[in-house]
Amino acid sequence: MRISPAASRKPSPSSASPTGSAFGSVTKTAHYSAHPFQMLQLVPMLARFAAEAPNLRLNAGVLLLPLMSPLHVAEEFATLDVITGGKIILGVGLGYRDVEFKAFGVPRNQRARRFEANLVAIKRLWTEEKVSMKTPYFELDEASCMPKPLQRPHPPIWVGANADPAVERAARLGDCWYIGPAAEISTVERQLQMYRRALDAAGKPFPTELPMRREVFVAKTRADAIRLCAPYLGAKYAAYHSWQQELPDDDNGLGQEFEALMADRFLIGSPDEVAEQIVALHKRLGVNHLVMSTEWAGMPESLAIETIDMLAKEVFPRVQQGI
């Protein structure tokens, strides 16, 4: 399913799968120094996806913006927007891992201020001929970004956020809040009301596109799905827990047994069950662009392909009937 230009309220799952028109976008995540997990880097992978899947939107989900130079980001993503014919999405987030901030020489306590300054600079570089801007972190002296992105006024900026202040920041600075995969859905439901209030305070309308990333796995039965994915998905969230992934205070946290962890976070089960979960998510929160993570470190590729195939052939038709 795709999101139409008129912004239909149907969820639009995202995957790296070449499974025809069932998918509307492909997303690449980003981390550095992610041992023991393999992490191919975001920009070169998006460029490769552009050649392999020219009809899909490409989502950077998310770039760790405080670590980056705004001019570098502006020019790279303007280039990606041009070579994709105007299909790039810039997803950005604060980051939270000390190893990444130390490696880039960025003090972690500056991340919010750097994030805001970088994002302001990127928007200006995309929309103005020359930009002069001096901050404690960089200086632009009649800097220019050429070529400009094809999308006007600029590519959509999805701001990833887990903590409450970051959600409010997403309302103020982003084109939409990119809801992450880790927080419990009940927590997201509360934060969504806060997001609406922050939009009202900023004088901005609710966005036509509300994206959310979730962990998804489909098998013939729920028991099979849990048995097959738990070793790999559980290891991923054990790593998130060890990395001290930031979550709101009312979330039960990631240091739980898998059954408890998945209860209000993941979309796992038979095709009927996952379809029901997606429909319920849409009706409960209004999510209309669902980014689906279907493979985790160590998982046999065949399991991910089977899930992607079942999503396209069995789950999505059920979702369309249920919306």
Image (tube, rainbow, N blue to C red):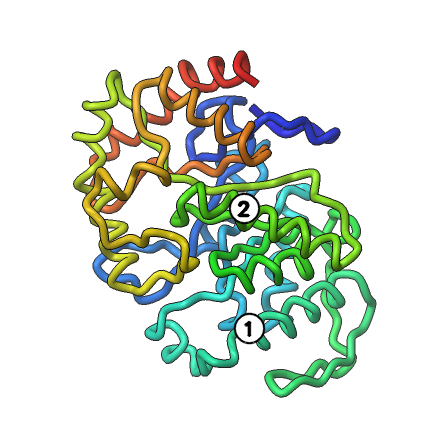
- Left or right relative to 48: residue 241: left
- Identified at 31% across, 19% down, the residue is 270
**Residue type, mark 1 in image:** Ala
In x, y percent, where is residue 127?
79, 61
- Left or right relative to 6: residue 196: left
Quadrant for residue 207, please give it.
top right
Say above or below: 10 vs 231: above
Label 2 Cα crowd, 10 Å radius (few <14 / some 14-19 / many 20+): many
- Identified at 52% across, 60% down, the residue is 164
Residue under pointer 1: 112
Say above or below: 127 vs 105: above
- Identified at 38% across, 72% down, the residue is 100
Q: CA distance from mark 1 to mark 2?
A: 22 Å
- Identified at 68% across, 56% down, the residue is 198
| Quadrant in the picture for the C terminus | top right
Label 1 Cα crowd, 10 Å radius (few <14 / some 14-19 / many 20+): some
Q: Secondary structure at mark 1?
A: helix
Residue under pointer 2: 59
